[in-house]
Amino acid sequence: MACACARAKRHRHLLPLYALLAWSAGSAQAANPPSYDCLIEPTQTVELGAPVSGLIDRVLVKRGDRVAHNQVLATLESHAEQAAADLAHYKSQLAGPSQQAQSKIEFSQRKFTRRRDMAAEKLMSRQDSDDAEAELKQAQAELVTARENREVARLEYVQQSSQLALRTIRSPFDGVVVDQMMWPGEIFEPGATKHAVLKVAQLNPLRVRVVMPLRAFGEPAAGMEASIAPEIPAGSHYSAKVASVDRMVDAASGTFVVFMDLPNPKLDIPSGVKCKATLAK
């Protein structure tokens, strides 16, 4: 009984020390928030081709080149399509038929006016006046037909231009060429084994995939800032923002994924490297 009392007395003396150790541990954890494993990836990577088949005429970029949005990257052979577009454009610019019809209307209008007045004064038969009126209406109809034909030619030009554009491969965003699968002289066919000519990745901003444990669910929120420390360059730190939080937890690993946007305007941050992410408090 005396030993038990002595042990209890010693424990009472150690209680302040236990409290101090617990407070120190909590302070250290607050001062050093936990970091989580992450991976830096491109925002998106796309394989580019054409919706039509044809002979690859030119590839204007190579692996590692920076490309801008809507920049022409490659073209298929398109001499026939270009000629058809040029012909349709020329037809859409033809003004002769409309001018001819307009001149015919002016002449028929004067002729009809004279014969109508003469018929009113009994100097000409009514039939001649009616014939002149019919001729005027026919000239007016010819002008309408000429204008309709010109509009049809304009629409044909738009159609041929659209067909020509299908043979041009453009970049859908600012990015970097990461691979070239086909070269000039090869036949490109949609749906074939080689279904793409180039692969382009968007590297600004970068997408950071952070794997977090189940206990941290509810901590990250969209717009929250985080510090990203990639493997290379060593010792570097960058600021990122939470873009989205996965609402599904992987039951097997007890983790969920958080996606962050990492600005990379100079493309000095490499993609495909591991990193550590620390959420800002």
Image (cartoon, grey):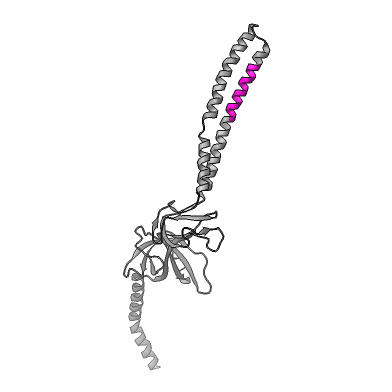
Task: Indicate yes or no whether the magenta region holds residue 139.
Answer: yes
Number of callouts in the render? 0
Residue 162 locus on image (x, y percent): 52, 46
Q: Specify start and end residues of the magenta stretch as a single range.
A: 131-145
* Residue 180 lies in the magenta stretch: no
Against 208, residue 3 (above or below) is below
Q: Position of residue 73 (x, y in %)?
A: 44, 54
Q: Residue 155 occupies which quadrant of the picture?
A: top right
Depth order, front residue of 28/89: 89
Quadrant in the picture for residue 190 = bottom right
Q: Nearer the viewer, residue 83 or 108?
A: 83
Q: Residue at x 36, y 85 (%)?
A: 11
Q: Of residues 68 and 266, which is closer to you in this image?
A: 68
Task: From the viewer's side, name the closer residue of 270 and 163.
Answer: 163
Residue at 53 percent of width and 26 percent of height? 99
Q: Position of residue 75 (x, y in %)?
A: 47, 53
Task: For the C terminus, give its image quadrant.
Answer: bottom left
**Quick check: can you spot residue 281?**
no
Report x, y in % for residue 280: 37, 64
